[in-house]
Image (cartoon, coloured by chain):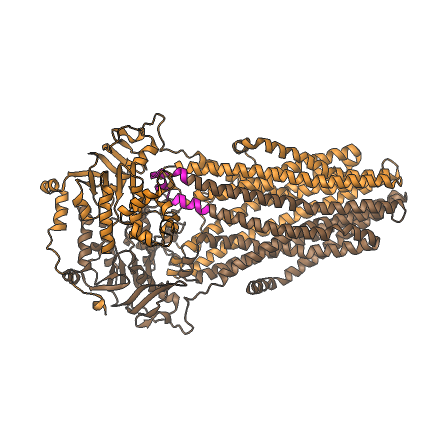
Chain colours: A orange, B brown
Amino acid sequence: MSTVATPPAAPQGDVHQEDALGKAYDARLMRRLFQYIHPYRGLFVLSLACLPLTSLFTLAQPYILKLAIDRYIANKDAAGLSTMGLLYAASVVGDFAFFYLQYYLTMLVAQKSLADLRMHLFTHVQTLPAAFFDRNPVGRVLTRLTTDVDVINEMFSAGAMTILMDVVTLLGIVLIMMTINARLALVTLSLLPLMVLAINFFRLRARESYRLIRERIARLNAYLQEAISGMAVIQLFAREDKTFRLFDQLNDSHREANHWSNIYEAMLFSMIEAVSAISIALIVWYGGGQIVAGVFAFGTLVAFIEYVQKFFVPIRDFSTKYAVMQSAMTAAERVFQLLDTPATITSAANARVPEHAPGRIEFEHVCFAYKNEDWVLRDVSFVIAPGEKIAIVGATGAGKTSIIKLLNRTYDVTRGRVLVDGVDVREWDLAALRRRIGVVLQDVFMFSGSITENLTLGHPEITAATVERAATIVNAHRFIERMAGGYHAPLRERGNNISTGQRQLLAFARALAHDPAILVLDEAPASVDTETELLIQDALEKLMEGRTAVVIAHRLSTIEHSDRILVMHHGQLRESGSHAELVAQRGLYFRLYQLQYNRPAAAAPAELRAGAAK
Amino acid sequence: MMAAVRRLQSYVWRYRRRYLAGGACLFITATLAMSIPYLLKRAINAIELGQSSHEVTFFAAAIVGIALVQAVARAFSRTLIFNVGRDIEYDLRNDLFAHLQRLPQSFYRAQQTGDLMSRLVNDVTAVRMLLGPAILNLVNTPLYYVYAVSIMVRLDPVLTAIALLPYPLVLIVVKHYSRQMMEQTLRVQEQLAEMSSVVQENLSGIHVVQSYVAEAAATAKFAAINRRFQASSVRLARVRGRMLPVMKVAASLGTLVVLWYGGLHVISGRLTLGDLVAFIGYLGLLAWPTMALGWMLSILQRGRAALQRLEHVFGAVPDICDAPDATPLAAVQGRIEFRQVDFAYHTPGNGHQVLDGITFTLEPGQQLALVGRTGSGKSTIAQLLPRLADVSDGQILLDGRDIRTLPLQQLRRSIGFVPQDPFLFSDAIRANIGFPLDPVDDQRVHEAATVAGIADEIAAFRHGYDQIIGERGITLSGGQRQRLTLARALAADPRILVLDDALSSVDTRTERRILEALRDTQRGRTSIVIAHRISTIQHADLIAVVDDGRIVELGDHETLLAHDGLYAEMVRQQSLEEELAEL
């Protein structure tokens, strides 16, 4: 069987669930959203109070028209007419002022509460453990904080509040019409039930096609994004034709859904307009007879016509607002889901900061798995005395990195205990624990910002003098001074504008500036550039001075300079001891050592340069 | 801008018939709309004169009839024009996509995916708004004005002039506000982008933030941009809050003038009440198109900006393409020759030399291994072969022909390339492995998966080869991803295989097994392998040590070991880990 050009739809359930639209109103979500409005409830109530006022001024206008015609124009009272004119003008100004006030206040409250929500999200995300970020790509979390919050904002600017206003207005219109003349009102609105039915008919279809559009545009965009990210793959296999065909299919299905939506919406819109005109005809037909019969005057007729026109405006916009509400609820759902993700690694309630903390480390029967039963560490136990320099060696996947990640609680152990200065790390105050442990990873991460900012990471207690001293000790001062701006020289995103070796030295300086009692380091592979290599080796030695140091070693020099070596193998600690002890033990390490050192020393490096290639 | 406008014109021209039909429907709609106040006026005059309800009924019935016909015309006009907008949007998207597929990798390196997406999503939408709703209103508004004003003038020219007095004023105000709105919108968007990058960076470096307890400083940084964003959002809301009701106010002011001034005329007997009502009616008809005009101004502005941004994509030159005189090889044998190949990234200002005088020859069926540290240029050598980039100087020959004289499709389809980044599509495993095949052939997919050492794991997935992978399916380990990309490269049974550090996440034993399987199924396939584990490429026919863009050592394993240079040194360094893993 061959699968020809299946669009990237999934056979397994609805893969685009995340984009599906749910309810337009969800009481639970609304209650949670209102928690963010609560601090600004005064302003919010004020903005709500503006709603009926705005409606009042809008709806007063036709009534003033009626009075003007019936009382003054009909009675040829020019002065009275002028008064009415002024009244009308006042209502226009009031309408404008209160609309503006209402909109401004609503947006003010919305922006303030949403800024709080974003802040809440951001601080919450800061507390989430590494395991969360393993599962959730950065892009997805970013979307929650920006796009989704923005969609909720739409609810305030174009959805909920105006729907509320519309309802107030519609009720007001019916009320006024009934007050002026109940029978004419009934005749005028007699088409309403029919219209509601018809509107509902189209609205449901429009909504369905709107749902389809959302789903299809999500697919189209997802495909597009992937195609852009994977353009090299498409081009490498010269499969532009096939990829284009799939894109065209998705694009076409999106267009088709839109075509239908356009048709439904055009029909709905036209029908509302027609019903509006027919209602006017009804007013004239029935009202005309009444005027002739002397039941009421012209002004009523005019006012009714105006009211009917105002009546249909909000109905016309309803489906758009409904969609906005739906999207907002979906977005709120996702945002709260992120907020509800528990921060599993936090300080315990009775967290401690040991007074005497010289930097002793103890692993007690530690087992660790990132998930399920895939053990990365199996029953690992060792003790590191304060000030000891430890080198961890072992193959990729032996569990070296996991050891250092358990130490500062990037992850928590699955079984057993990790103790720092005699206290289980889970009982430590988390911030205090992490401040005591300086971590330098292989892949050095630099933020965009000045060198100083990157070294202090915003800790105000680290002075400029400390920064410079640290940089000098780890041999970074020289190249920093050479950069334009020195310590204020800006680093680009991820430190792209400096070399790998320089980034390494900066990471050392960063650790040193924070002066940790325990240094944890995942050594980067040796550099081919000898000069940099010497600088790094020298810096490393100085960095370890006077601290407990745990280094995942890749350099023989590091291993030789360490007090003790831990040999990891398949998640287990297989050997531990000084170089001499391990050699005497004739085990794993010894075989390694033989392989490494007992080879005949290299003769003078041959110059088999590019000449061989030419 | 001119190029953008010309491009737009060609799209519009393609759909001129439907635009015309839509326009005609708009014309009918407007004409019928104008007759309603007229009938209203006649009805009211009839009522005023106290005529029989018979006549009033007739006018009312006429309004109903017209409303119904108008509804049909209106529905057609909107459907026609809005659908054309969607059709052009569709064309535009397809054209953009096809263009993107032709653009070289250098374009993508300079461009962020997010930025491109925003162009293809938001800017295309903005252009569609221009071609649908904006065009509709562009026709509709003048039509209504011409109609209504000419009728109003005939009723009472002075009253008309006075009634319309607020409108030009309003247009000026709206234009002013819409400029302010543009500026504020732009500022808000910029700050949103800034906020996004702050968050993005923070999340990417969260391990550093957390291990140095720098959450407070990170939060303060975010709080600052969050506050700025909030402030400018509120400023935008203020402009918008003023802009939205302005048109409504204008319409109301018109009514006010008519009521007051016209009312006086009715009192003095110069105007009938029916005329006054009709006047108010016509003015009411203008309210909506006038409001739409204000809205349109912002659509026009956004559309213009969007067109320019799209032109930036359309304007990018697909410089890696078939030469005009390209002719295919009858059959690809797989002899590869690099002749003094230089390569430099030509970024404006500083050309960065990446490769310098790369020269080697691979006979069909031979294997070349490239070793060297990160950034030495190994990957670039591999990428030049399928012309992901073109050489700056020198030549690359396939079966004796400069690859630039071959059809791009033939060149690329004869190479199975496994890139460093194991990119897979969020699609079924079958579709991913079978990506080079069209149509997908299950037999070959299975064979490729077997050679790549991933078949057993696929069988263990719940949906087997139908299993969706990626964000919406299952998550694969790095090693699984790498083996899938290898299977993909093998699916089309290419003459040449390129592995760009393609098995780095696979453990040594598996890597060796895969390489053995590859050798068994090789059948004279030429291959270039970049590996960071030297032990796995010892059997290569040719090993090239690349350092700083040059080949510094070239020969087989034994020769290079005996030579005791960089290669021998690397072998020694790497043994530490590998031997341990073997124990």
Residues A251 and A176: in front is A176
* Furthest residue in direction top, as rendered: A350
The relative height of residue B340 versus residue B458 in the rendered view (above or below) is: below
Residue A72 screen position, x and y as percent: 86, 39
* Furthest residue in direction front, as rendered: A465
Residue A69 screen position, x and y as percent: 84, 40
Residues B539 and B360: in front is B360
Tell whether position B145 is magenta.
Answer: no
Residue A181 screen position, x and y as percent: 80, 34
Residues B327 and B344: in front is B344
Location of the C terminus of chain B (image quadrant): top left
Residues B502 and B546: in front is B546
Instruction: Using the rendered image of the protein, determine whether residue A27 is visible from the camera's viewpoint.
Output: no
* Furthest residue in direction bottom, as rendered: B325
* Furthest residue in direction left, as rendered: A584
Q: Within the image, what quadrant is residue B569 found in?
A: bottom left
Which residue shows up at 67% across the image and 38% down it?
A98
Q: Within the image, what quadrant is residue B150 found in?
A: bottom right
Q: Main secondary structure of the magenta part?
A: helix
On screen, residue B457 versus residue A29, left or right, reads left
The relative height of residue B262 versus residue B405 in the rendered view (above or below) is: above
Which residue shows up at 37% across the image and 72% down it?
B405
On screen, residue B221 versus residue A611, left or right, reads right
Q: Which residues are magenta?
A: B196-217
Instruction: Using the rendered image of the protein, determine whether residue A301 is visible from the camera's viewpoint.
Output: yes
The relative height of residue B260 versus residue B440 in the rendered view (above or below) is: above
On screen, residue A182 versus residue A455, left or right, reads right
Location of the N terminus of chain B (image quadrant): bottom right
The relative height of residue A282 versus residue B516 in the rendered view (above or below) is: above
Which residue shows up at 31% across the image and 33% down it?
A433
Residue B72 screen position, x and y as percent: 70, 51
